[in-house]
Image (tube, grey):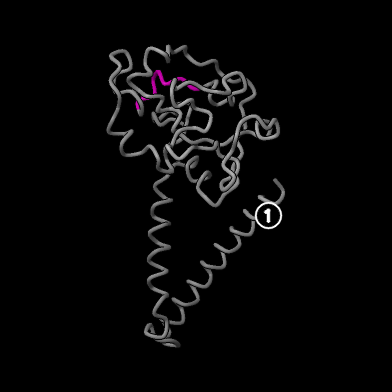
Amino acid sequence: MFTQAVFQKSFTRVSEVEAVVGELVDALLARGVVDAADLPGFHAAANDAQARADEVSELSDVARSMRWPNVSLRVEPDEPDAPEAVDCASRMAVCHAVCCKLRFALTAEEVEQGVVKWDIGHPYIIRQSSNGYCAHNDEFSGGCMVYEHRPGLCRRYSCRGDDRIWKDFDGMVLNQAWIDDHVGRPDAILLVDASEDGERE
């Protein structure tokens, strides 16, 4: 954890240096000290950086904090709410356990217990297999292979009321548009609480 925290600090410093160098080049260009032709790669790099910044600015705070390269740890609430019971088995043929494709950070305790796998390249985000599902998802049954030791966020999550997943929960109609547009992207995050503006956090 210490090594990864050092890496994160280093990445932050590199980003700060990039910003300062960009401002310096802009000032030199504006004052005519250098010519744009002398820096052929600068504008392409600046445009790429701006595109990445625009993409990040559209993400929620939670999604932004989990964006690579970052080290992310989740903090559990003092008194976690009990989720509304959902009969997952009866819905599996419709939803195909899409909630197991959503990303989230583990807590320090979950990491230290060593039962739940995390993404080695993106600590400490739940590990996903090449098919996009959580590494603990049984591809045949859709169930959780570490159910008794599943993360707290999984214990507190209920897809009932998650309008990202269900267009009509009772009628078992998926929100296929949201799933197709978001699952597999940085903003497809397992969320539990709903804020006042209706966005899940």
Residue at screen point 47% across, 31% down: 190
Can you identify the residue that label 1 sits on?
A: 6
Could you tell me which quadrant the N terminus lies in? top right
In the picture provided, is 180 more to the left or to the right than 38? left
Residue 100 locus on image (x, y percent): 46, 29
Residue 75's quadrant in the figure? Answer: top right
Q: The magenta stretch spans which residues?
A: 157-163
Q: Is residue 56 above or below residue 13?
A: above
Q: Residue at x 47, y 42 (%)?
A: 63
Along the viewing direction, whichever of 169 and 33 lies nearer the viewer: 169
In the displayed structure, 155 sits above or below 33; it is above
Question: Residue 65: x, y in percent?
Answer: 53, 45
Pick the front one: 140 or 149: 140
Residue placed furthest toward the front: 140
Which structural element holds mark 1?
helix
Q: Is residue 158 covered in magenta? A: yes
Q: Is residue 158 above or below residue 12?
A: above
The quadrant holding residue 180 is top left
Q: Residue shown at 44%/20% (left/top)?
A: 141
Report the amino acid beneath label 1: Val
Q: Residue at x 38, y 59 (%)?
A: 51
Magenta span: chief secondary structure? loop
Residue 21 position, x and y percent, is: 52, 73
The verdict on residue 181 being magenta is: no
| For residue 119, side relative to residue 93 (left or right) | right
